[in-house]
Image: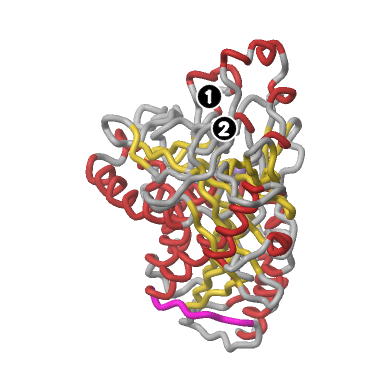
Amino acid sequence: MSENKNLRYEKKTVYELAGATVVDEAYEYAKNYVKFLDAAKTEREAVVESVRIAEAAGYRAWNFGDPINAGDKLYYNNRGKNIFLMRIGTENINNGIRITAAHIDSPRLDLKPVPLYEEHGMSFFKTHYYGGVRKYQWLAMPLALHGVVVKQDGTVVDVVVGEDETDPVMYITDLLPHLARAQGSKSINEVFQAEKLNILVGSRPVDGEEKDAVKAGVLNYLYEKYGIAEDDFLSAELSIVPAAKARDVGFDRSMICAYGHDDRVCAYPSLTAMIDSTDTKHTAMCLLVDKEETGSDGVTGMQSSLIVDVIAEIAKALGGNEAAVRANSKCLSSDVTATFDPNYADVYEHRNSSLIGCGVCLCKYTGSGGKGGTSDASAEMVGWTRRFLNEAGVVWQISELGKTDVGGGGTVAKYMANHNIDTIDIGVGVLSMHAPYELIAKVDLYEAYRAFKAFYQF
Ligand code: MN
Ligand code: MN
């Protein structure tokens, strides 16, 4: 009865299924991804890079009230921290929009509003961590400072320190093992506390200063270099990120370790897929959003009304009905998942885990415990997604984050789905997720690109 049909489902790798040409293409594609990673360590920098890439491909800035016509390639830059790319198709807009949604913020340490102080001849910045970090991973390593200081007159001062080989770097001290005996019997949360994540920024006192002479030296430097005083920190967004660049990993160079794969490893392929896709029929959007790591709240997060407002503008301009447009749209929530790690096998359920090199990962649902806080894509949506992936020859797998009772996590999927837009999670598996240096496989990155391209063109 079934002699001509393989009835079994088993995961296979990109190496087995797609072959050497695709693997070569993946290695080539990864080179530009690495450049993007190094140029875009914060959401603001990711927007600048995305604008540069989009404009080079003929996209132009759009604002509310500007005309929208079939064939237009537009982008909306939201406060320099998130960006929507839009390509307007020729078919009836009521048929919906093909949307991808990835985030461009990553876990890091932000400076507090009053960061600078001196203690025992050392000057420090106080930090407030952003997103889910394992605090001990940020100690005793070179760090960089990225961000903006907005002066009272509105002048915006861009700050990047620690990226150039000749720059100084930022640093957080750690306890020497010789004196760490008592730490060994304590819990990880007791030992590593947020108020100890203080950035060492100076140890040389200014001659003749009676009080806080080291801090005085830091303030002198900041004034000379950036024209800022201590009160300018009150209106600043300054972040501490790892200082080193993205690097190939493995003798076969099959992997990349870098800061911020979550979620540039989905943002970059969705952006380039949008730009490279040749489809002119469907209207498409590529959303690169901020604040996912802290819950997607705020004016630049996915929970903002911006997406609904922009869809309403597109619908109005093209003579459509915005509710119909949303009801018939489809969204790929493009975010990372956890790749199975044999070193920590006990937290994963192997049959339902993302495996390295097995291609881009679908997640029908995210959330924690009994699917708490997930939109859970319908079987119909998964079926539709299978169809376009398989027709395009994309190597893909389906997975959950880990064992059901162990933990969990979420993405922007539910916020899109709450607008009555069919949404499914799809993204790249990551090892050491949320660590200062995360790891991905090049072939999985490339299958994400191929998946997004297939989605825009299906
Ligand atoms: Mn993410
Ligand atoms: Mn994350």
Taking the image as shown, residue 415 lies to the left or right of residue 164, namely right
Which portion, as a residue range, is magenta? 57-63
- Residue 388 rendering spot, x and y as whole percentages: 46, 53
Q: CA distance from mark 2 to mark 1?
A: 35 Å
Count the numbered circles shown. 2
Mark seen at residue 139 = 2
Residue 137's image quarter?
A: top right
> Disc 2 residue type?
Leu
Residue 336's image quarter?
A: top right
Which element type, helix, strand or loop, lies under badge 2? Answer: loop
The residue located at (69%, 38%) in the rendering is 119
Which SS type dominates the magenta stretch? loop
Q: Single out the residue that lies furthest toward the front.
A: 208
Mark seen at residue 388 = none
Residue 100's place in the image compared with 324, above or below, is above
User: Within 10 angstroms of label 1, few (less than 14), some, or many (20 or more) residues?
Assistant: few
Residues 214 and 74: in front is 214
Mark seen at residue 351 = 1
The residue located at (72%, 31%) in the rendering is 193
- Residue 230 rendering spot, x and y as whole percentages: 69, 60
Residue 304's place in the image compared with 77, above or below, is above
Which element type, helix, strand or loop, lies under badge 1? Answer: helix
Magenta highlight on residue 288 = no
Residue 274's place in the image compared with 185, above or below, is below
- Residue 188 rendering spot, x and y as whole percentages: 69, 22
The residue located at (65%, 79%) in the rendering is 315
Taking the image as shown, residue 257 lies to the left or right of residue 17, namely right
Q: Is mark 1 within 8 Å of ligand 1?
A: no
> Does residue 433 show up?
yes
Residue 320's image quarter?
A: bottom right
Magenta highlight on residue 62 = yes
